[in-house]
Amino acid sequence: MKFDVAIIGGGPAGYSAAETAGKAGLRVVLFEKQSLGGVCLNEGCIPTKTLLYSAKVYDLAKHASKYAVTVPEVSFDPARIVARKSKVVRKLVLGVKAKLAESKVVLVQGEARIVDKHTIRCGEETYTCDKLILCTGSETFTPPVKGVDAVTYWTHREALECKALPASLVIVGGGVIGMEFASFFGSLGVEVTIVELLDEILPGMDRELSGLLRSEYAKRGVKFMLSTRVASLAQAGEQVVVSCENTDGQESLAADKLLLSVGRRPVIHGFGLENLGLSMAGNKAVTVNDTMETSVPGVYACGDLTGFSMLAHTAVREAEVAVHHILGKDDAMSYRAIPAVVYTNPELAGVGQTEETLQSAGIAYDTVKLPMAFSGRFVAENEGVNGLCKILLSKSDRRVLGVHVLGNPASEIITLAGMAIEWKLTAEEWKKIVFPHPTVGEIFREAAL
């Protein structure tokens, strides 16, 4: 079977590339060995946000009196929360399938294996293509901790299916995944402890705002052990014992459940990648140029496989760039303004440079900080809660270099900042844009002023 484009992997990068190419009239085949939608749709972005929204509604109900609303009795049902999550996922997967069918994409369920840049085997069938796009995604990394093979632990998959809450939970890893699960389980009354090797949670996010978020969750009862290494794990009946080491010495934690969330790594094995002879970044990820083409002409890589920005929205844009290059359109990938969001309550979002990256690069900058209370809409909807907006401007011409927000709904307004950074607006140019009133996004105009 002959196709213009063959795509391996049906996650955000893969299905976006397939839809874009199919709509352009190319003959497309998409291979997916597990579930269409990839990690993001089935066991990542969408299901976690669905759980988190249930927890947020529960939080709002518990504190409804702050808004002069009486809720006599508040409760939750973990099994129904998980059932709703599964329903949302099924609905969205069907939506992706429908869009691919509309774009005339041939979907092949099975494990594809590359023979060469023009030939792919899947089952007993052989498929040929002019162009190949690799979108194999990433997988959970399990740390080589002593005793890890002898204990029962969760990854994000098991945590998403929890229908009976544990009394206590230790989370190893204070990154985005760890903090979001800490938010979910903490809101539902689970005793949560986060063990993080670094001296602050959420590496890569603005350090000051990460610290503020950590302080907020510490007030709610989440315990943080920073600059702490997990030395070993052991099973003690139904509980897991986590032995830790830091400058204060050694400490052992016993919990009903253990969640390992120390990161993800690109999937580079199991589909014949070695048959292409691609240039690799330290044998950990595939290197690409700004059109997402690899070192082998006609072969592209998008999404987590490149190891650069393991975010679904980055993958979607990369896929679009790759297909545009195949179609002969002038396009190039820019990583100047890739938003990052932590969907805790409150949310934390950032785009562009952080103070830490600017300092490391020796770039002179000015910092503008405003409490979120400068937004009337924020005050109206966040009784007794504050947040912070930070804008980083170049010292020479006051161009917007980075923006970071702690406070709801940071995820929804951060794109306004991303546009300012991508288009290289100055503070003077940004403040000329008319923001609707009252909106939380007006905080950016207030800061620019």
Image: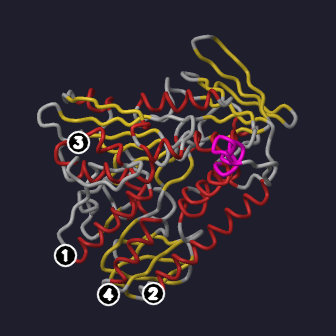
Q: Is the residue under label 3 in contact with that under label 2 (CB below 8 Å)?
A: no
Where in the figure is residue 187, as x and y percent of width and height? 69, 41
Q: Is residue 160 left or right of residue 25?
A: right
Q: Quadrant of the N terminus?
A: bottom left
Q: Earlier in the sequence, mark 4 or mark 3?
A: 4
- Label ID, residue 25: 4
Q: Residue at x 27, y 71 (%)?
A: 298
- Residue 84 in percent (x, y) is at 70, 64
Under tag 4, what secondary structure?
A: loop
Q: Amino acid at mark 2?
A: Glu
At 17% from the left edge and 44% from the top edge, which residue is drawn? 426
Q: Which mark is residue 102?
A: 2
Q: What's drawn in magenta, residue-wise?
A: 56-69
Residue reaching furthest to the right: 237
Q: CA distance from mark 3 to mark 1?
A: 32 Å
Where, by quadrant of the figure, is residue 371 drawn?
A: top left
Q: Nearer the viewer, residue 122 or 311?
A: 311
Residue 180 position, x and y percent, is 59, 44
- Res. 127 image quadrant: bottom left
Q: Is residue 213 above or below residue 301?
A: above
Contact? badges 3 and 1 (CB < 8 Å): no
Q: Which mark is residue 400?
A: 3
Say which label, 4 or 2, has the lower sequence index: 4
Above or below residue 138? Residue 403 is above
Between circles 4 and 3, the one closer to the viewer is 3
Residue that label 1 marks: 328
Q: Is 315 in front, or is 448?
A: 448
Cα separation, mark 4 vs mark 3, equals 39 Å
Question: In the rendered image, is residue 42 in sight?
Answer: yes
Label 1 crowd bin: few (<14), some (14–19), many (20+), radius 10 Å: few
